[in-house]
Image (spheres, grey):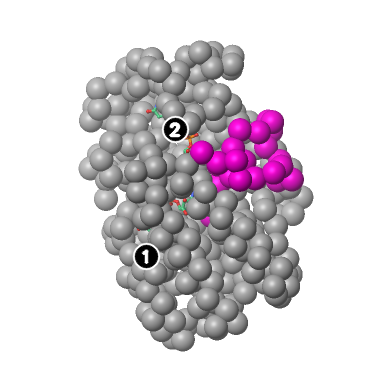
């Protein structure tokens, strides 16, 4: 009995593999390595001292996917595989719709063919759009601002239809807030291609001297210090949330959307200060205009995760920055 992890070599996938293996689960990883490297899987093995099967496979390749389901006794799927860059999705919407939506439909077809009906899906807080804070799972979704966000919303709707058509399915739609940090060993972490889009990888590259200064997008938001506020969650906490979600989908059929966040927000300036403390480096920054599509502040209502999964985040913003810094300074060139 194995858990199939799609996109398992990626940032969140690799950390989740570590927690799954440490818990004694059997896993099978597939990835096309579009946005990751096989080295990440080697390091997962190093950290855990455990081996597992992995395949270079694109979820759009139905034939190979079917062969993998045939070869293995897969009982649940954690589905991370997808493209995730918001700006890029505005330039290349069709690539995003094809990869994320067609890829998920193909995966679901193969799961159905093999009678595997338990799935944990990587959704995103972006499905809420600009809503009242804290974001609750009962809020209306779909008011999204990018093709990327729309793929997450549409996949949620597809999974709801699949469940409506067959109540034997068990589906967890995990809506992540802002995952940051790295494994505390310093061996795995986020390894962005080119100039990072997201705040913490950008700060880490300023701290290591690869980038000169952080652009802070907006200092006139309606927040205590004028900069954007987000709910940052340590990637290891997030990985543990997936363990709990797998246990949850195993237990019973149903469909639940569940926020995975800390339930607390930090501003850009607060994150900079925490990173300076963790790294002992000065982070140069300069204010710029607001980034299109950004909103002032959001964070999760984290109660449902606690009630349904028994999950609550444990790791602080300081720990998130310390672990990011260890990963960045031990691996200045990434993997
Ligand atoms: P990532 O890019 O590091 O990992 C995704 C992995 O999927 C990569 O290894 C990539 O090579 C693989 N992949 C992409 N398309 C594939 C395909 N067609 N077939 C096989 N493999 C494919 O991203 P991540 O940060 O680990 O995110 C994982 C998931 O969580 C994504 O679905 C993302 O949209 C979602 N998510 C991420 C964040 C975030 O801030 N990182 C927030 C919310 C949701
Ligand atoms: C955080 C804050 C920026 C970069 C994105 C996606 C979202 C989800 C997580 C996948 C904001 C500010 C940023 C910089 C800055 N991904 N910032 N300078 O935008 O909350 O969420 O990642 O689902 O869908 O949109 O995260 O890290 O980009 O930004 O000032 O160079 O940092 O304006 O206030 P965001 P982020």
Q: Quadrant of ligand 1?
A: bottom left
Assess disc 1: are there few (<14), some (14-19) or many (≥20) residues with their C-alpha within 10 Å of its C-alpha: many
Q: Does the Cβ of the disc 1 residue fall within 8 Å of ligand 1?
A: yes
Give the structural element (helix, strand or loop) at label 2: helix
Q: Determine the secondary structure under disc 1.
A: strand
State the extent of the magenta-drawn residues as a range. Answer: 122-145
The reply to whether the residue tagged 2 has its Cβ within 8 angstroms of ligand 2 is no
For marks 1 and 2, the one nearer the N-term is 1
Q: Is residue 175 something one can see in this rendering?
A: yes
Q: Residue furthest right?
A: 307
Residue ranking furthest to the bottom: 70
Distance (Cα) linking label 1 and label 2? 28 Å
Q: Which residue sits at x=27%, y=50%? A: 335
Q: Is residue 242 visible?
A: no
Residue hosting label 2: 321
Residue 97 sits above or below residue 176 on the image: below
Q: Which residue is mark 1?
A: 31
Left or right: 82, with 191 as reference point: right
Q: Residue at x 31, y 58 (%)?
A: 34
Vertical placement of residue 195 versus 94, above or below = above
In the depicted structure, whether residue 153 falls above or below residue 326: below
Magenta stretch, main secondary structure class = loop
Count of numbered circles on the image:
2
> Could you say where residue 237 lies in the image, as x and y percent from the top left?
56, 46
- Which-is-in-front pick, marks 1 and 2? 1
Residue that appears at 76% across and 50% down: 307
Residue, far front: 94
Residue 91 in the image, given as x and y percentages of width and height: 34, 43
Query: 95 left or right of 154?
Result: left
Residue 251 placement: quadrant: bottom right
């Amino acid at each position: 009995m194995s858990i199939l992890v799609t996109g398992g070599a990626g940032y969140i996938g690799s950390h989740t593999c570590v927690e799954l293996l440490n818990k004694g689960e059997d896993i099978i990883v597939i990835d096309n390595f579009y946005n990751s490297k096989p080295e990440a899987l080697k390091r997962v093995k190093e950290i855990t001292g455990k081996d597992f099967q992995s395949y270079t496979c694109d979820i759009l390749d139905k034939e190979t996917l079917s062969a993998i389901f045939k070869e293995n006794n897969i009982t649940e799927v954690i589905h991370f595989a997808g493209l995730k860059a918001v700006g890029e999705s505005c330039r290349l919407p069709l690539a995003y719709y094809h990869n994320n939506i067609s890829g998920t439909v193909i995966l679901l077809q193969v799961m159905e063919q093999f009678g595997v009906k338990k799935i944990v899906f990587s959704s995103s807080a972006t499905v809420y759009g600009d809503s009242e804070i804290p974001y609750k799972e009962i809020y209306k979704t779909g008011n999204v601002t990018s093709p990327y966000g729309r793929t997450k919303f549409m996949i949620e709707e597809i999974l709801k239809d699949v469940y409506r058509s067959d109540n034997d399915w068990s589906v967890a739609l995990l809506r992540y807030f802002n995952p940051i940090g790295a494994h505390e060993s310093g061996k795995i972490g986020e390894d962005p291609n080119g100039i990072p889009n997201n705040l913490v990888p950008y700060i880490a590259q300023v701290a290591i001297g690869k980038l000169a200064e952080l652009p802070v997008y907006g200092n006139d938001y309606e927040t205590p210090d004028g900069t954007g506020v987000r709910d940052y969650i340590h990637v290891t906490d997030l990985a543990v949330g997936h363990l709990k979600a797998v246990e949850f989908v195993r237990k019973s059929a149903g469909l639940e959307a569940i926020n995975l966040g800390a339930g607390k927000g930090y501003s850009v300036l607060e994150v900079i200060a925490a990173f300076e403390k963790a790294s002992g480096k000065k982070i140069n920054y300069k204010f710029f205009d607001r980034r299109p599509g950004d909103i002032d502040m959001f964070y999760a209502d984290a109660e449902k995760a606690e009630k349904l999964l028994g999950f609550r985040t444990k790791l602080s913003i300081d720990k998130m920055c310390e672990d990011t810094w260890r990963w960045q300074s031990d691996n200045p060139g990434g993997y």
